[in-house]
Image (spheres, rainbow, N blue to C red):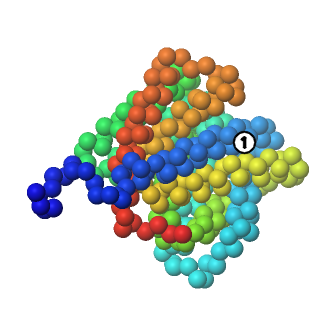
Amino acid sequence: MTAAMTPPDATPPPGAVSPVRAAAPAMAATVCAMVSVQTGASLAVPLFGTVSPAGTAWLRLSCAAVILLLWTRPRPGRLPRSGLGAAAALGGASAVMTLCSFQAIDRLPLGTVSAVEFTGPLLVAVVGSRRRADLVWPLLALAGVLLLTRPWEASADWAGIGYALGAAAGLGGYIVLTQRVGDRLPGRQGVALSTAAAAVTTGLVVAVGGGAEADWFGPHVLAVSALAAVLLPIVPHLLELFALRRLTAGAFGTLMSLEPAVATGIGFLVLAQTPDARQLAGVVLVCVAGTAACRGGARGAGAPVPG
């Protein structure tokens, strides 16, 4: 049989990398990013009593911006305008996501917020899908998230739900724009510039809301903010940038459905929160959906992967 007649499912030639192996590092980076997010989020909540949710978001993003700018030393004048525009847009999406998420967490249980926020990545996964069969995985992941978080059991707080939906929109835009920034700007300069833009945006929100208070700048608050900035957003942003350079936005969006599962595991280990049968079933569903999405989610060899 000639090469032209080889069936599509024939054994790949020696040295070829299967889609599963190609996507595996990106999948691992995404999971590590979610662990860092959940750990960092746990540090933010105690600050709400001293610093407002918006102020906590501003301090965290400001610390992250200072660290990243000193580390990467970006030179905007030497970067393409399209990349700078994408970084500014990403900063806006990051600011919306962080501000709304902190406001929602201040009003609603974390599980409910996580479930509502997942609608952003779910929309990205559905829109980014090229095959009708791929629509099964976001639906399966959504069923798992509902079983895991049971948002219908929470007391209705429409302001909190509105903020959570705003965070979902910000997260959906964050996924798409992070991939765009990764393709257009070299190295980690896009991360630094977008984080600085997010810090400026949140700073404007804080200023409109009455400005910062003196006790926001105490040693304890600043130390916790700096540590939280490393865990969220610096480490997750870098890991997610690595993943989005190697995965389609749709596959990454579906993988984000693992966030409630990661939160459940951390809750069990750190807070002794034992999941029941329905929650465990939800963990299984989202893990299956994430793995299935990752199998076909590796970006093509021609996709740019900046250094």
Residue at screen point 60% across, 57% down: 238
Residue plotted at (37% across, 55% down)? 17
Give the percent coordinates (x, y) of residue 143.
Answer: 40, 29
Determine which quarter of the picture holds residue 158.
top right
Work out which quarter of the rendered image holds the N terminus and state it.
Answer: bottom left
Which secondary structure lies at badge 1? helix
Q: Is residue 267 left or right of residue 288?
A: right
Which quadrant would residue 91 be assigned to in this image?
A: bottom right
* Residue 171 seen in render: no
Question: Which residue is at the far bottom?
Answer: 78
Q: Quarter of the image containing the C terminus?
A: bottom right
Relative vertical location of residue 103 with respect to residue 189 in this rendering, above or below: above
Query: Label 1: how many residues lie within 10 Å, few (<14), some (14-19) or many (20+)?
Result: many
Give the percent coordinates (x, y) of residue 259.
54, 38
Say what amino acid the circle numbered 1 marks. Ala
Q: Is residue 211 left or right of residue 173?
A: right
Q: Residue at x 60, y 63 (%)?
A: 191
Q: Is residue 15 left or right of residue 45?
A: left
* Residue drawn at point x = 36 percent, y = 51 percent: 19
